[in-house]
Image: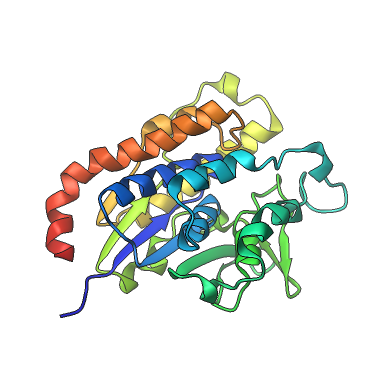
Amino acid sequence: MKTPKIGLALSGGGYKGIAHAGVLSFLVDQDIKPKILAGTSAGSIVSCLYSIGLTPQEILNFFKSVNILNWHFFTFKKAGLIDSNAFEKYLFSIFENRTLDDLPIPVVVNSTDIAKGEIHVFNSNTRVIDAILASSAFPAIFSPHTINDQLFSDGGILNNFATDLIREECDFLIGSNVCPIEQLDKKNLNSLRSVAIRAYDLMAANHNRAQSALCDWLIESHHITQYSTFERNKQRMDEIFDLGYQAAARTFKNHQDKFAKAVL
Protein backbone atom coordinates (compact mmCIF):
# COMPACT_ATOMS: atom_id res chain seq x y z
CA MET A 1 0.00 0.00 0.00
CA LYS A 2 1.51 3.35 -1.04
CA THR A 3 2.03 6.16 1.44
CA PRO A 4 -0.48 8.99 0.84
CA LYS A 5 1.19 12.08 -0.60
CA ILE A 6 0.52 15.44 1.03
CA GLY A 7 0.88 18.56 -1.11
CA LEU A 8 1.17 22.19 -0.02
CA ALA A 9 0.46 25.21 -2.26
CA LEU A 10 1.54 28.69 -1.13
CA SER A 11 0.12 31.81 -2.75
CA GLY A 12 1.84 35.03 -3.62
CA GLY A 13 1.40 38.09 -1.42
CA GLY A 14 4.69 39.87 -0.74
CA TYR A 15 5.63 40.10 2.91
CA LYS A 16 2.23 38.74 3.84
CA GLY A 17 3.79 35.48 2.65
CA ILE A 18 5.46 35.33 6.07
CA ALA A 19 2.15 33.82 7.17
CA HIS A 20 3.13 30.75 5.14
CA ALA A 21 6.01 30.24 7.54
CA GLY A 22 3.51 30.36 10.40
CA VAL A 23 1.43 27.71 8.63
CA LEU A 24 4.54 25.55 8.26
CA SER A 25 5.25 26.00 11.96
CA PHE A 26 1.84 24.53 12.77
CA LEU A 27 2.39 21.66 10.33
CA VAL A 28 5.73 20.90 11.99
CA ASP A 29 4.04 20.85 15.40
CA GLN A 30 1.50 18.36 14.03
CA ASP A 31 4.22 16.27 12.33
CA ILE A 32 2.57 16.90 8.95
CA LYS A 33 5.20 16.63 6.22
CA PRO A 34 4.36 17.83 2.70
CA LYS A 35 5.98 15.74 -0.03
CA ILE A 36 5.48 18.25 -2.84
CA LEU A 37 5.17 22.05 -2.82
CA ALA A 38 3.88 24.70 -5.21
CA GLY A 39 4.87 28.30 -4.69
CA THR A 40 4.06 31.56 -6.44
CA SER A 41 5.95 34.80 -5.82
CA ALA A 42 6.44 35.03 -2.02
CA GLY A 43 5.14 31.47 -1.87
CA SER A 44 8.02 30.35 -4.08
CA ILE A 45 10.50 31.88 -1.64
CA VAL A 46 8.96 30.16 1.38
CA SER A 47 8.58 26.84 -0.47
CA CYS A 48 12.20 26.72 -1.59
CA LEU A 49 13.57 27.83 1.79
CA TYR A 50 11.53 25.13 3.52
CA SER A 51 12.53 22.49 1.00
CA ILE A 52 16.22 23.15 1.48
CA GLY A 53 15.86 22.72 5.23
CA LEU A 54 15.22 26.08 6.88
CA THR A 55 12.88 25.99 9.87
CA PRO A 56 9.78 28.22 9.91
CA GLN A 57 11.53 30.55 12.38
CA GLU A 58 14.58 30.75 10.11
CA ILE A 59 12.30 31.60 7.19
CA LEU A 60 10.81 34.45 9.25
CA ASN A 61 14.32 35.66 10.09
CA PHE A 62 15.25 35.55 6.41
CA PHE A 63 12.40 37.92 5.53
CA LYS A 64 13.46 40.23 8.35
CA SER A 65 17.01 40.32 7.00
CA VAL A 66 16.03 41.39 3.49
CA ASN A 67 16.00 45.11 2.71
CA ILE A 68 14.84 45.20 -0.89
CA LEU A 69 13.56 48.78 -0.63
CA ASN A 70 17.09 50.13 -0.11
CA TRP A 71 17.62 53.12 -2.39
CA HIS A 72 20.81 51.49 -3.75
CA PHE A 73 18.58 48.96 -5.54
CA PHE A 74 16.48 51.52 -7.39
CA THR A 75 17.00 51.49 -11.14
CA PHE A 76 16.38 53.87 -14.03
CA LYS A 77 17.57 51.45 -16.73
CA LYS A 78 15.04 48.65 -16.28
CA ALA A 79 11.25 48.35 -16.38
CA GLY A 80 10.66 48.65 -12.64
CA LEU A 81 11.45 50.87 -9.69
CA ILE A 82 13.80 48.24 -8.23
CA ASP A 83 16.21 45.89 -10.01
CA SER A 84 14.94 42.37 -9.33
CA ASN A 85 18.54 41.09 -9.39
CA ALA A 86 19.22 43.02 -6.18
CA PHE A 87 17.50 40.20 -4.30
CA GLU A 88 19.99 37.61 -5.59
CA LYS A 89 22.66 38.29 -2.98
CA TYR A 90 20.24 37.32 -0.20
CA LEU A 91 19.42 34.04 -1.94
CA PHE A 92 22.87 32.97 -3.14
CA SER A 93 24.24 32.34 0.35
CA ILE A 94 21.48 29.75 0.82
CA PHE A 95 20.93 28.18 -2.60
CA GLU A 96 24.19 28.94 -4.44
CA ASN A 97 23.75 27.49 -7.96
CA ARG A 98 21.42 24.66 -7.01
CA THR A 99 18.62 23.80 -9.41
CA LEU A 100 15.04 22.93 -8.53
CA ASP A 101 16.00 19.29 -9.08
CA ASP A 102 18.54 19.59 -6.25
CA LEU A 103 15.91 20.48 -3.65
CA PRO A 104 15.11 17.64 -1.19
CA ILE A 105 11.34 18.24 -1.46
CA PRO A 106 10.05 18.87 -5.01
CA VAL A 107 8.93 22.48 -5.55
CA VAL A 108 6.86 23.65 -8.52
CA VAL A 109 7.39 27.35 -9.28
CA ASN A 110 5.42 29.39 -11.80
CA SER A 111 6.00 32.78 -13.35
CA THR A 112 4.59 34.87 -16.20
CA ASP A 113 6.29 35.06 -19.58
CA ILE A 114 5.55 38.72 -19.98
CA ALA A 115 6.27 38.82 -23.74
CA LYS A 116 4.12 35.80 -24.65
CA GLY A 117 1.46 36.55 -22.05
CA GLU A 118 1.58 32.98 -20.79
CA ILE A 119 1.99 31.10 -17.52
CA HIS A 120 5.42 29.51 -17.34
CA VAL A 121 6.25 26.58 -15.06
CA PHE A 122 9.99 26.14 -14.55
CA ASN A 123 11.61 22.82 -15.34
CA SER A 124 13.78 20.99 -12.84
CA ASN A 125 17.03 22.24 -14.43
CA THR A 126 16.24 25.87 -13.59
CA ARG A 127 18.40 27.51 -10.95
CA VAL A 128 16.39 27.96 -7.76
CA ILE A 129 17.45 31.60 -7.58
CA ASP A 130 16.28 32.31 -11.14
CA ALA A 131 12.92 30.63 -10.51
CA ILE A 132 12.37 32.68 -7.35
CA LEU A 133 13.42 36.00 -8.90
CA ALA A 134 11.20 35.40 -11.92
CA SER A 135 8.21 34.34 -9.85
CA SER A 136 8.60 37.27 -7.44
CA ALA A 137 9.09 40.17 -9.87
CA PHE A 138 6.09 42.20 -8.68
CA PRO A 139 4.94 44.28 -11.68
CA ALA A 140 5.91 47.97 -11.78
CA ILE A 141 7.81 47.60 -8.49
CA PHE A 142 10.49 45.09 -9.57
CA SER A 143 11.98 44.81 -13.03
CA PRO A 144 11.21 41.62 -14.98
CA HIS A 145 13.81 38.86 -14.62
CA THR A 146 15.61 37.54 -17.70
CA ILE A 147 16.39 33.83 -18.18
CA ASN A 148 17.83 32.68 -21.52
CA ASP A 149 16.51 35.78 -23.28
CA GLN A 150 13.00 35.22 -21.91
CA LEU A 151 11.46 37.99 -19.84
CA PHE A 152 9.57 36.93 -16.73
CA SER A 153 7.37 38.86 -14.33
CA ASP A 154 5.48 37.90 -11.18
CA GLY A 155 3.76 34.50 -11.25
CA GLY A 156 0.76 36.04 -9.55
CA ILE A 157 -0.20 37.98 -12.68
CA LEU A 158 -1.76 34.85 -14.22
CA ASN A 159 -1.80 32.30 -11.39
CA ASN A 160 -1.26 33.55 -7.86
CA PHE A 161 -2.29 30.33 -6.12
CA ALA A 162 -1.01 27.43 -8.19
CA THR A 163 -2.94 24.59 -6.59
CA ASP A 164 -3.72 23.20 -10.04
CA LEU A 165 -0.04 22.53 -10.73
CA ILE A 166 0.20 19.83 -8.06
CA ARG A 167 -3.41 18.73 -7.51
CA GLU A 168 -2.92 15.52 -9.51
CA GLU A 169 0.39 14.83 -7.76
CA CYS A 170 -0.99 14.50 -4.24
CA ASP A 171 -3.70 12.67 -2.31
CA PHE A 172 -4.39 15.55 0.08
CA LEU A 173 -3.78 19.18 -0.86
CA ILE A 174 -3.25 21.92 1.71
CA GLY A 175 -3.43 25.50 0.45
CA SER A 176 -2.29 28.66 2.21
CA ASN A 177 -3.69 31.84 0.65
CA VAL A 178 -2.52 35.21 1.97
CA CYS A 179 -4.50 37.39 -0.47
CA PRO A 180 -8.11 37.45 0.72
CA ILE A 181 -9.92 40.66 -0.24
CA GLU A 182 -11.48 43.15 2.16
CA GLN A 183 -12.95 46.57 1.42
CA LEU A 184 -10.44 49.40 1.81
CA ASP A 185 -10.97 53.00 2.87
CA LYS A 186 -10.24 55.21 -0.14
CA LYS A 187 -7.81 57.24 1.99
CA ASN A 188 -5.52 54.21 1.85
CA LEU A 189 -5.43 54.40 -1.96
CA ASN A 190 -3.61 57.69 -2.33
CA SER A 191 -0.31 56.70 -3.98
CA LEU A 192 0.97 54.96 -7.10
CA ARG A 193 2.26 52.07 -5.01
CA SER A 194 -0.94 51.58 -3.00
CA VAL A 195 -3.12 51.57 -6.13
CA ALA A 196 -0.74 49.19 -7.96
CA ILE A 197 -0.76 46.80 -5.01
CA ARG A 198 -4.55 46.98 -4.68
CA ALA A 199 -4.99 46.26 -8.40
CA TYR A 200 -2.64 43.29 -8.12
CA ASP A 201 -4.47 41.96 -5.05
CA LEU A 202 -7.87 42.21 -6.78
CA MET A 203 -6.54 40.42 -9.83
CA ALA A 204 -4.98 37.71 -7.67
CA ALA A 205 -8.15 37.24 -5.62
CA ASN A 206 -10.19 36.66 -8.76
CA HIS A 207 -7.81 33.86 -9.78
CA ASN A 208 -7.64 32.47 -6.27
CA ARG A 209 -11.35 31.64 -6.00
CA ALA A 210 -11.16 28.78 -8.48
CA GLN A 211 -7.78 27.62 -7.20
CA SER A 212 -9.00 27.55 -3.60
CA ALA A 213 -11.72 25.06 -4.55
CA LEU A 214 -9.02 22.51 -5.41
CA CYS A 215 -7.78 22.40 -1.82
CA ASP A 216 -8.76 19.69 0.63
CA TRP A 217 -7.75 22.06 3.43
CA LEU A 218 -7.70 25.82 2.77
CA ILE A 219 -5.91 28.11 5.21
CA GLU A 220 -6.70 31.84 5.18
CA SER A 221 -6.77 34.69 7.68
CA HIS A 222 -8.80 37.76 6.78
CA HIS A 223 -6.94 39.70 9.48
CA ILE A 224 -3.91 39.65 7.19
CA THR A 225 -5.48 42.36 5.04
CA GLN A 226 -4.43 44.81 7.78
CA TYR A 227 -0.80 44.33 6.74
CA SER A 228 1.18 45.69 3.82
CA THR A 229 2.43 43.67 0.86
CA PHE A 230 5.78 45.37 1.51
CA GLU A 231 5.67 45.31 5.30
CA ARG A 232 8.98 46.44 6.86
CA ASN A 233 8.14 46.60 10.57
CA LYS A 234 9.71 43.54 12.21
CA GLN A 235 7.16 43.37 15.02
CA ARG A 236 4.39 43.30 12.43
CA MET A 237 6.25 40.53 10.62
CA ASP A 238 6.04 38.51 13.83
CA GLU A 239 2.31 39.22 13.90
CA ILE A 240 1.91 38.00 10.30
CA PHE A 241 3.75 34.79 11.22
CA ASP A 242 1.40 34.30 14.17
CA LEU A 243 -1.66 34.89 11.97
CA GLY A 244 -0.54 32.05 9.71
CA TYR A 245 -0.07 29.71 12.65
CA GLN A 246 -3.42 30.64 14.17
CA ALA A 247 -5.28 30.26 10.85
CA ALA A 248 -3.78 26.79 10.37
CA ALA A 249 -4.68 25.76 13.92
CA ARG A 250 -8.24 27.10 13.61
CA THR A 251 -9.01 25.52 10.25
CA PHE A 252 -7.35 22.21 11.13
CA LYS A 253 -10.14 21.54 13.60
CA ASN A 254 -12.62 21.47 10.71
CA HIS A 255 -10.44 19.24 8.53
CA GLN A 256 -8.82 16.92 11.05
CA ASP A 257 -11.11 13.95 10.37
CA LYS A 258 -10.89 14.40 6.61
CA PHE A 259 -7.12 14.66 6.84
CA ALA A 260 -6.85 11.56 9.01
CA LYS A 261 -8.96 9.51 6.58
CA ALA A 262 -6.85 10.66 3.64
CA VAL A 263 -3.42 9.96 5.09
CA LEU A 264 -3.89 7.08 7.52
Relative horizontal placement of residue 124, taking residue 161 as reference (left or right): right
The quarter of the displayed image where residue 8 is located? bottom left
Q: Tell me the residue at 52%/21% (across/down).
A: 185
Q: Tell me the residue at 35%/41% (across/down).
A: 220
Q: Is residue 54 visible?
A: yes
Relative horizontal placement of residue 263, taking residue 87 as reference (left or right): left
Relative horizontal placement of residue 212, taking residue 2 as reference (left or right): right
User: Residue 226, how many percent across, how many down?
Assistant: 47, 27
Position of 203 relative to 92 (above/below): above
User: Residue 138, how many percent across, how many down?
Assistant: 64, 49
Quarter of the image with the C terminus in it: bottom left
56 or 227: nearer the eye?
56
Relative horizontal placement of residue 192, taking residue 167 as reference (left or right): right
User: Residue 250, how many percent across, how many down?
Assistant: 24, 38
Q: Tell me the residue at 68%/52% (across/down).
A: 90
Q: Colour scheme of this structure image? A: rainbow
129 or 200: nearer the eye?
129
Quarter of the image with the N terminus in it: bottom left
- The extreme right residue here reads 77
Q: Is residue 214 visible?
A: no
User: Residue 212, how many percent across, how many down?
Assistant: 34, 53
How many marks the image carries: the answer is 0
Q: Tell me the residue at 67%/63% (across/down).
A: 152
